[in-house]
């Protein structure tokens, strides 16, 4: 077992149309489970880390199925609780060509967002952990969820654990009376690695800039504990064809990955989470330049895998980074 | 086109496991749409009536898909509205043998239950109608839904339209502060045909009896406009094997149908709705005895059809009633 | 390789609904190929005979697929021709419980029925054959098909080949200007084994009787070359539950098989053809009583197999005949 | 409800192989319903028009299923009749890469082509209509179908309804004794918008030219009521990769759309019908240049959707026309 | 977490035909993982025990998938190792009606059977365990597997752990030079609960008797540590219809369960393992009579669930034991 | 029937994941049968040759299914034997984008490799044959398989039959004590057409060169009977996008085919076998340049077809060679 990583967040049932059908054509849907932070966790479990996800599900068989899914994919579910509330859902209509994918979220009142923060013993959860990861989706769900995150961050700090936060601004969440500027700055104050684009800087940290590196420098001024800020640039030629490049600002300079061409996308959901997981793995094991290359290559591979999670091996990511005989069958 | 029937009620997306899998085994689900009153409506459309269903869906593609489903099956959707709120869902784990089916409802905050009653012009909706059908599920959803039902019933009365109500007591609903005894008696006061078992009598009408006919007589005393009370008796030998018999109290006596053996059940959901539809059709076209036979035979056929709705032709029900060469292939 | 059998007849693409769906629910159909006589031929190929089927398909890829299907299942396709005309189709809606299966035939103008009889060299086709089998469907399709059958029968007679005919009266065929009484008696005159029920006797041979044995005796008087007349009695408790019993009149007496209970039918199509194949095999290898038992047991097994054809091994039929530990898993 | 459009034409059951299988590999087929004019009608229904399709189906459950499909997709089926004859079919083998798709038509004797023209009351059908659309496939099916079309056109003229005709020359049709030159010129005489390529001009209107604009001018001379002639140019790099550009001659000049690259085609069937629908919508709502851009963008989207019909929303077409962040997921 | 149970044994990939197809019809197979002892372990995990399975898989992705499956279903995989050798397979052709299911085993050289016994630290594995379960399949696989079992049993004895052994004689195994009589008696010497039928007694323990209770008494004489001997009687009316009854000899008398009728079997594989798991649970929590009733009811439920494993909840088994309203849907 | 071709080799069951799933996601697998030489044979059967494949399967239903598959696809199975041993398997995880496909072979102890060479009467098998094809996989399986190949080659030589050998070096085979240099040179001595890349030359013939043409000349020196040496160059841009070009050294010069772009690969397995089959067909019917073009175009088409085998018609290959309107639908 490798290093210990802990993540927190809602896990939803994903119901997706099949064979490129539209919602109005669907008479069956594929079922899988995912959520931004759990996707990161699953990905790190595949790469060999000891990965714990903290969440809650309703006490029925589909909640159990969601929990089982995490377990199947190698995630430690010791801190997966049962609680009141729904199983969050999202419906995915797969896109293709010039037709964009569509998502219908149906996640309000999910069991995780209603979880009593007192039920989580962070001293125990984070005991021996090397890394803690959270995202901006969690504090956007409910006051409880925001409180949990903050408490986890405080304990992480007391234990000297490395913390990453994906400042993932979602306009349609934040419905419980608070806005991102009420909550996010304090959470960011405990975080060493941020994923943030220009919109996230503005909406979550009130940092306005039209240049990534400049925004990073501003953020560093406000939050001096920050070590890395990262993001990807995605060009969308079509729903089937994107290009992807990763950026990592390390306080000094902005390192860049290769730019990958992805003309036959299978499933783009979770691409950002795969990047995040790759970056965590990279920063734990490689130098900065290799870390951003690893993260981007991992994200590219995710686009080839159905479902939310990046089910790839370490050697497969390294192989893509080599850039030779890509995708070749070995017998 | 035959007589005009109007029904009202929530329509849910039904997500069911396939090939007898349990929820924890499911990685795909079958999608269909249904709800007690809509099932009645679809069934009557198959039998040739001009059948309108009144409901509301959220303004997204899955709401559209639900509406399209009604339309596909021959229901008139002129009074299907778009509104705020969710698309109600239910998850079905198909049972088999000694293993009971399981349902997980996820329907709170559905668009129908949040519909502003003022958006429904019952004078127009019921114009020329021969029959109006409602069920105890609707007033159990929300005050709005209860109000809509009452208003519809008043207009129906003013127009002399025949009314049936399926007094379907569901313990897990009724979460908006009212109980069945607050609401149901007034609704029943406008209804001529009731579906009610002993539990329904007790919970909805405060009529306690351990005898169906006695309970019927008590009901008639309280609600003298009642013409028929009906129910089925279902023996559950296993999830795959039930026996079914229909009863119709017509104010004078309790007529009984044949008792049907159903040892190879395909899908029992909607069996009661198929019975209700069969009874409406029967009372509109046949004498009382034939009506109850027709209703029961229709319900039996439903058990052979996947999905909520009883997609059968008139001649198929009549064929089953004959009781000879049942299920025989004709070339 | 066992004895050589030759059959003739149309082979259709069968498109059937899945998972007990009705036609109006189907958005996919299962594809297989079958036809009464080809079903007999495939069944005999499974039992180890050298089985040739004579037919024609259109010269397109679906015609090829039909031909390939015969080949896959062990039928010799040396006399499968390409010709003008359609690939006959039939649509099957699987029945269940009290709901009868439905078939929509779409077979007119099929390539077999339009085949020029001159293209078939019966001297060559029947060379070395031990048995020739035809059915009443073929002469009902077209004059060409009736002519081919007659020619085949004449050559069979000249070679002393045993001939069986399934007098299968189908009211919806016979659309080319002739009726069964114009054609069938002459064909029967060359046949030694007949499958015929009372309706077939009446419609095809103008023999009226309400008793099978009596009808057999009348037939023998008119057609003295007849050695055996056979039929099954099928009780249809429901589409899922039939009972089956076989009868074989051998000129002297009517031998009867066990009566089999079939309460979980998978696919009843081709049950009669499986019986016919079993009888041919039985008469070629066993005594009369064992032959009728074998035929009926074979037919029973067919009901457990999806598709038209009875894909069973010899030992499986014999096992069923033993009547002990039926259906038991052997490891 | 938007403007009223009426279309006429055969609707076939489409049976297509799945997962890129060839016909000889198929043991299941996907079922959907389509036909050139119905595809136009469905597409316009999605865009919000009140769309009626005129056709006929056999009086069996699959005919009903076809009719239900139209209804499901929002088409008004008030003028869908039942009649003698078959349900037309076509089998589709999906192509991929350098392997072309294959179609096997099996549509002769379909119920629509045998419909007695007297059963259609065009005064009623076209009452209040804004547009009538026909294609060259209909008059190629049968004399009856040609007669219906002509009658419809005459009534349309009397009512001042805009008419479009897709001069779609299909060599394999026209089997009832007439050729396109016998029939098409008269029909074109009533039409204001034509879809026509150089081959269509030659075969249907006897106009020979190797230049589209020149052919248009010739046509205008012969048929002075014509307002627009339109076509698309499709480059086939492979079955998976086409390029598409639209052209609209408006009597003065030939307007051109952007040229779209389509390197990941999902289903190209119905691409032309989607273009036609887009053009009708465009000409009803936009200026000429925007109309041709809209038509082409709509057709491009069709290539991403399985089935014959272009199930897209207005805003999706407009989004593609913008040409930025194409195919991007919005959350 | 409940009591700790440890099991050992090979886990195979199961490849089964779908929709009742025969092997010769299959162009797809369902994948699941199972093995007699792992099935017991999974079942006990569902019932709430802390269940560890000891086995080995090859170090490839399908070995990982098998391990993940155990994990998904709640089994602790701390002692699942990677090793040289194959992933054992078995192919299952589902039976139906009078047609027996067929199994083709392809398990030789599986990684478990080649595992070096020295890699298993039984002191650690059995630390704190309440029960150890083995079956006669394991020592039949290889000398290594027999050695592992013996070593486990010795440690279990030293720790005073309760031991059950399923004396499951499989004629086709035992290919490594030893026979059951060479190995089994010593293993039985450490076991307190045996599953054994008359054939097993004879082949594995050289005890000949035609009476179960008599055989039990003989066994007790030879192996005085035995506390319980158990078996089921299964009547096979057909592959779809069995009857099942459980027997438990407790040293004094033979307790019997109700006899269950199972006329609609979904999947009978693992029925014996479900019984074993039920008995272990029963003996740990109930009195002897309730234990045998629980075991049999659990086994009955297994027949309703696709796959090898009995995925049922405690309350579902108790519900079946009540024998009222079996299989009834609760809303 | 065209010319007679004979091939020899193992045929495996291929179990592949669906919908781009990874092995760890698979709960169903697609089943098809293939092997390098059988793939060549099937392909030649589609092109109209009389194609015989020599192999052996275990005497169970899946062995029968494999044999039936060959028969279905037009291969003559007169010399397909039953024998002891397993049915070889391989598991395929389909790749996509930058993610390479994965294969897990599970073929040791297959029935073909254990076949007693004495059971094959090569005089009879090769009677009248025009071409014999073998590959380097066969002698790598077992001594028996190597012996069979050699014997076949000797008889082929005595009959003056053209011989091709695909020198397909597979490092993971050759486990029976011999290496390629012990066996391959002698087999090559009887062969006129070789498929060989630089690695194959080195490993199988001890010819070291970094230039194809130079290696060919060296081979010709050692094996003067060689007439042609051929290979393809495959650029792997990704698993979904390859480029392919064919080379044919004819003793004088190296002829080259067009280079094909394949950006939407459906299934690349069997691409080399399709090339080989194309070359055999080409050399039998065309001049050298057209032969190599034909072979490469055939291989390109294979990439569009699921399964191992190249199920294409002659006219489809010729169409691709034309290079115009590639992939265009013809109606």
Image (cartoon, coloured by chain):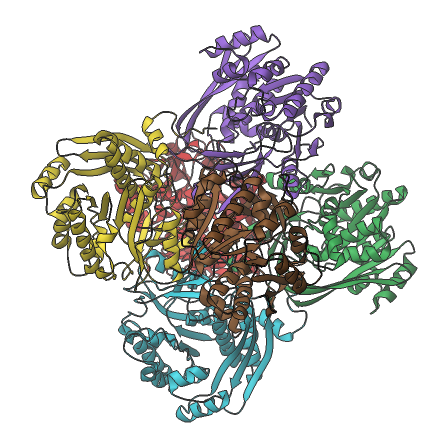
Chain colours: A red, B green, C brown, D purple, E cyan, F yellow
- Image quarter of residue C89: top right
Query: Could you tell whether D295 is left or right of F73 in the image?
Result: right
Q: Where is residue E128 in the image (x, y as percent from the top left)?
A: 41, 77
Q: In which quarter of the image is the N terminus of chain D?
A: top right
Front residue of E56 and B69? B69
- Image quarter of residue B101: bottom right
Q: Where is residue D125 in the image (x, y as percent from the top left)?
A: 72, 25
The residue located at (27%, 77%) in the rendering is E177
Query: Could you tell whether E110 is left or right of B133 in the image?
Result: left
For residue E294, say whether it is visible: yes
Q: In this view, does E138 lie above or below B165?
A: below
Residue extending furthest toward the bottom: E221
Q: Is residue C53 above or below residue E133?
A: above
Front residue of D317 and B183? D317
Query: Could you tell whether A144 is left or right of F132 in the image?
Result: right
Q: Position of residue B313 (x, y in %)?
A: 72, 48
For residue A168, say whether it is visible: no
Q: Position of residue F58 (x, y in %)?
A: 33, 62
So how many labels did they put on this image?
A: 0
Front residue of B43 and B156? B43
Residue extending furthest toward the left: F221
Q: Is residue E182 above or below residue C171?
A: below
């Amino acid at each position: 077992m490798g290093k210990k990583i802990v993540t927190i967040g809602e896990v939803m049932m994903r119901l997706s149309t099949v064979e490129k059908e539209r919602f109005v054509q669907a008479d069956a849907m594929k079922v899988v489970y995912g959520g931004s932070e759990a996707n990161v966790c699953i990905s790190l479990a595949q790469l060999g880390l000891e990965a714990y996800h903290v969440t809650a599900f309703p006490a029925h068989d589909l909640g159990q199925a969601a929990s089982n899914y995490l377990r199947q994919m190698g995630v430690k579910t010791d801190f997966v609780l049962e609680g009141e509330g729904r199983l969050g859902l999202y419906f995915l209509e797969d896109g293709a060509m010039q037709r964009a994918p569509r998502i219908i979220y149906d996640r309000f009142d999910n069991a995780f967002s209603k979880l009593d923060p007192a039920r989580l013993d962070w001293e125990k959860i984070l005991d021996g952990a090397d890394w803690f990861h959270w995202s901006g989706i969690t504090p956007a769900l409910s006051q409880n969820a925001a409180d949990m995150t903050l408490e986890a961050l405080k304990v992480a700090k007391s234990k000297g654990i490395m913390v990453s936060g994906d400042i993932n601004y979602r306009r349609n969440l934040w419905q419980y009376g608070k806005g991102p500027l009420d909550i996010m700055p304090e959470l960011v104050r405990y975080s060493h690695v941020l994923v943030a684009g220009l919109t996230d800087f503005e909406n979550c940290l009130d940092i306005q800039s039209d240049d990534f590196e400049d925004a990073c420098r501003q953020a560093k001024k406000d939050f001096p504990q920050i070590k890395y800020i990262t993001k990807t640039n995605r060009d969308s030629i079509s729903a089937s064809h994107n290009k992807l490049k990763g950026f990592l600002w390390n306080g000094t300079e902005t390192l860049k990955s290769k730019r990958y061409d992805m003309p036959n996308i299978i499933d783009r959901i979770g691409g950002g989470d795969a990047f995040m997981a790759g970056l965590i793995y990279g920063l734990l094991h490689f130098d900065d330049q290799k870390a951003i290359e690893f993260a981007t290559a991992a994200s590219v591979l995710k686009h080839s895998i159905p479902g939310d999670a990046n089910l790839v091996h370490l050697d497969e990511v390294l192989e893509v980074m080599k850039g030779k005989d890509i995708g070749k069958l070995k017998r």
